[in-house]
Amino acid sequence: MTPLFIAQIGLTLFVFVMLLSSAAGMVYVERKVAAFLQQRLGPYLVGPKGLLQPLADVIKLMFKEELRPRAADAFLFALAPVISATCAFAAFAVVPFGGDTTLLGLIPEGLRLQVADVNVAILVVFAIASMSVYGIVLAGWSSNSKYSLLGGLRSSAQMISYELSYGLALASVLLVGNSLSLTDIVNRQAGAWLGFIPRWFVFVQPIGFLIYMTAGIAETNRAPFDFPEAEQELVAGYHTEYSSMSFAMFFLAEYVNMVTVSAVATDLFLGGWQGPFLSESFGWVWFLLKVAAILFFYVWMRWTLPRYRYDQLMRFGWKILLPLAVINLLVTAAGVLYFGA
Amino acid sequence: MTPFYLFAAIAVGASLLVIAQRNPVYSVLLLIASFGALSGLYVLLDAPFVAVIQIIVYAGAIMVLFLFVVMLLNAPHEETHYDEQVHPLMRPGPMRFGALLALGLVVELMWALKRGAESGRFAGGAVSSVSAIGRLLFTEYAFAFEVTSILIVVAMVGAVLLARREGAR
């Protein structure tokens, strides 16, 4: 039991708790920003400035009755939200969110702020994203309700379609970064061009960034791509039949997925924990700021753009985004060959 | 050694359960579990790249397609009274076919175990590096690689053609 080992375990627990609380925080931020954009006040009664609203929501959800349709497949009905939540949390394990730190001198060696340093981290993120489809599909199927099934099918079609562009955007970054490890990619983005432009890959891969963010929003089923839960047509999509804590798990998974996609985008395109003014051991402050900025963008998008039509979504995914991603990858590969990595 | 036995037990157990299910959706899920355990075995062999690709390609892509098909062909009540009495595996047709397959498997296993001694262990480092895999794929195994891609293109064209004909009526 070396101090580093204990610190590692502490870090794992810390990441888990932080993801949980970030989801709660996002619920609050989402409601406040939505209210701001719609010139309302938003939650303000529970606690100072309504800050305890997420807590009230959680308590409400916990005390609701757990309902299950009689025709539902009991085992899969219970399993589906677990798969969703597990995938959401698992993906963050390979995301580095800060440089080495000694926790202000508490431990002798530097601790990498990352739960698991996998040298194929980008692929792990992609693999877990592709596994999270199951939670939604199974939720839709096991509910034995037409709205749930349609929602589940739609969402899986959407996620499969946008996964390709998502993967190709990841591939173009790893060509530029010349590594599959997120830590290496962040380290390659240190420094600045001409002294003031940071060496972020978003400036090398602007189209890749746009594709990644678009596909990321579609992967997390957020507006304007929130078809699985298009309430006018499908009631609530795949989680129509879910109530109480099993609904809360889907809800949690959605927000944690948003945080993960934002964190991966920060690592890949926005230089991760690299930033001026702060030393390496306080890089996580920059990381948090960048993730928060992307998350704000997410919420802003949701309350600005109306939902697409389903055929528009599919046409956009296959006929515009995918060819663009392929061209971007080819151009990137040619550029890397010509200029060197 | 313990993780190996854990993953191996999951892989074998899940694969056996795949064929013992009445509900095909459960079969698909158990197959995914089996693939997950296989991927764990690859990690133990120092091949994280192969492990992740196993998840992405098999568990993430192909099995989603399987699940789609099984779910949309959802027909648990197509069976007759006899079918409901007798487990599908206990019927004469499947039993003979299964026995044949099992015999084939035993022969293959014997053959593999016999020549396993001379083929030796994998060189661990060689499979873990992505660039090494890429180089091998595009030099030594380029022909097999290209032939596979042609095969996939043929399958895709065939699928589109079949779907088209049905759509045009």
Image (cartoon, rainbow, N blue to C red):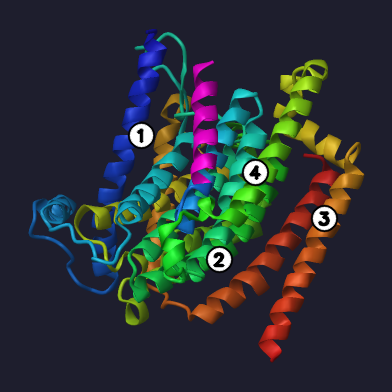
Magenta range is B1-18
Give the residue at x 57% y 41%.
Answer: B35
| Residue A7 percent coordinates (x, y) | 36, 18
Depth-wise, is mark 3 or mark 4 nearer the camera?
4
Quadrant containing the N terminus of chain B in the rendered view: top right
Q: Which residue is under mark 4?
A: B99
Q: Amino acid at mark 3?
A: Ser
| Residue B152 part of the magenta segment | no
- Magenta span: predominant SS is helix
Q: Amino acid at mark 4?
A: Ala
Which one is in front, B167 or A327? B167
Q: CA distance from mark 2 to mark 4?
A: 28 Å
Q: Which residue is under mark 2?
A: B69
Which one is in front, A20 or A112? A20
Marks 3 and 4 belong to one chain:
yes
Marks 1 and 2 belong to one chain:
no
Q: Which residue is under mark 3?
A: B149
- Badge 1 marks a residue whose secondary structure is helix
Q: Amino acid at mark 2?
A: Val
Q: CA distance from mark 3 to mark 1?
A: 41 Å
Q: Amino acid at mark 1?
A: Val
Q: CA distance from mark 1 to mark 2?
A: 38 Å
- Badge 2 marks a residue whose secondary structure is helix
| Residue B55 percent coordinates (x, y) | 58, 43
Q: Is any atom of residue A103 visible in this view?
A: no
Q: Which residue is under mark 1?
A: A15
Depth-wise, is mark 3 or mark 1 nearer the camera?
3
* Mark 2 and mark 4 residues within 8 Å of each other at the beta carbon: no
Label 2 CA crowd tier, 10 Å (few <14, some 14–19, many 20+): few
Which one is in front, A15 or A158? A158
Depth-wise, is mark 2 or mark 4 nearer the camera?
4
Q: Is residue B15 above or below residue B146?
A: above
